[in-house]
Each structure stands twice: as C-alpha cells, then as structure tokens.
Image: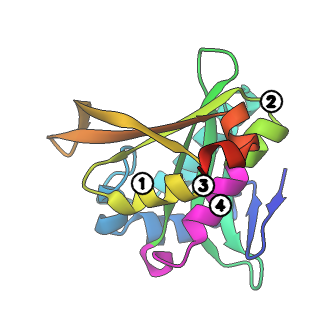
Amino acid sequence: MTINTPRLTLRPMILADAPDIQRLAGDKDVASTTLNIEHPYEDGMAKKWITSCQNMSDAGELVNFAITLTADGSFLGAIGIHFQETKGHAEIGYWVGKPYWNLGYATEAAKAVVKFGFNQLSQERIHAAHFTRNPASGHVLQHAGMLYEGSQQGPTIKWGVMEQLELYGVSREQFLEPELTSV
C-alpha cells in the first residue's frame, strides 16, 4: 500500500529504514514530542519497532507508513493509523525527523492518511492527540482537517512527567464535507 502526495511517498516500512529511523527518532527533541519513542534510542530498537509494526499490520490492528520524499526517496518520518476497539474508529500517530520540521511534511502526510482512512479503510471517525507543550502538532492536525475537541490532563506519562493532551477528531462526514467545517 502506497500513498502519493505532491511531495511525499508514504510506503510500507522496511528493515532497511532502520538506520534512518534510529538517526531521526534518536534525536531527543523528536523523542520528547511522542509518547512511544524512547531516548536514548539504542541499537536494535528501530528494527524491533519495524517488526512490531509489521506484526500489528498483519494482525489487522495498524497500517503504518514510512514518510519519504518523492524527489529522492529520503526517509523523513513515520505515520500510522491504529484501529480502535470501537469498529470504524482509528487513531493516527506520526513523527518527523527534526531536519524536516516546519516544512509542511507532517501536515501533508497526516491529511493523506486521514483521507486514506475514510476512503480506503472505511473508518467513521479518526482522532489524534498531542502533548500541550507541542502546539506545532496541533497545527498539523487542524490543517489535516481535524477539529479540536478539548484537553485532558493525564494519565499520560512521558519521562516521569504527567502530560496534558490536546484532543482532535473528525468524522467521515465532517472530513468529506469541508464546506461545513470552514464556516
């Protein structure tokens, strides 16, 4: 499964992506913005993560993509859609390497994956959350067509600190009828 956008190719992750994942996800600033990336990011963790994603994909729990530049194939991050227990509901999560921040790549990938979730995966609702201290991620979610739904203090813990989350979501109807949300 591959998704093409104007600048990106979202493709399945492969074990050959491990060095790029370790280099980019291993940046403390990248790790600090996500719930599940550890720091330090030790040797072997990227291969283990890729294998875990592939296993979850095989089990029908997740669709995960490497975010790459179409122009030269450079790996710049990852994005996935994780199916929830409630049928038709999914959560997206993503990270982008620091050299690629503030260039619109996360937004482009997120919008494509939300659209993919509704059009190809027949989801009825897609949601996401970000740490309050990472407002750039909120901008990504808004530009990807998601609507702000509120804040939640805890129970999310990152590096021993309780994090406040900002919650976003969008239904199929809201996303596919953008004139309703742009008023």
Answer whether residue 110 is magenta in the image.
yes
Q: Amino acid at mark 3?
A: Ala
Q: Could you tell me residue 69's position as x and y percent?
A: 70, 77
How crowded is the residue under tag 3: few (<14 C-alpha within 10 Å), some, or many (20+)?
A: many
Q: Could you tell me residue 182's position as x and y percent?
A: 61, 51
Residue situated in front as seen by the camera: 38 or 180:
180
In the image, taking residue 161 as reference, residue 128 lies left or right, namely right
Looking at the rendered image, the disc whose residue lies closer to the viewer, 3 or 2, is 3
SS majority, magenta: helix
Q: Rounded to the nearest whole Å, what is the CA distance between mark 2 and mark 4? A: 18 Å
Q: Is residue 43 visible?
A: no
**Can you identify the residue that label 4 sits on?**
109
- Above or below, 35 relative to 112: above
Res. 122 mark: 2
**Can you identify the residue that label 1 sits on?**
138
- Whether tag 1 and tag 2 are in contact, CB under 8 A, the answer is no
Q: Rounded to the nearest whole Å, what is the CA distance between mark 3 and mark 4? A: 8 Å
- Whether tag 2 and tag 4 are in contact, CB under 8 A, the answer is no
**Can you identify the residue that label 3 sits on?**
144
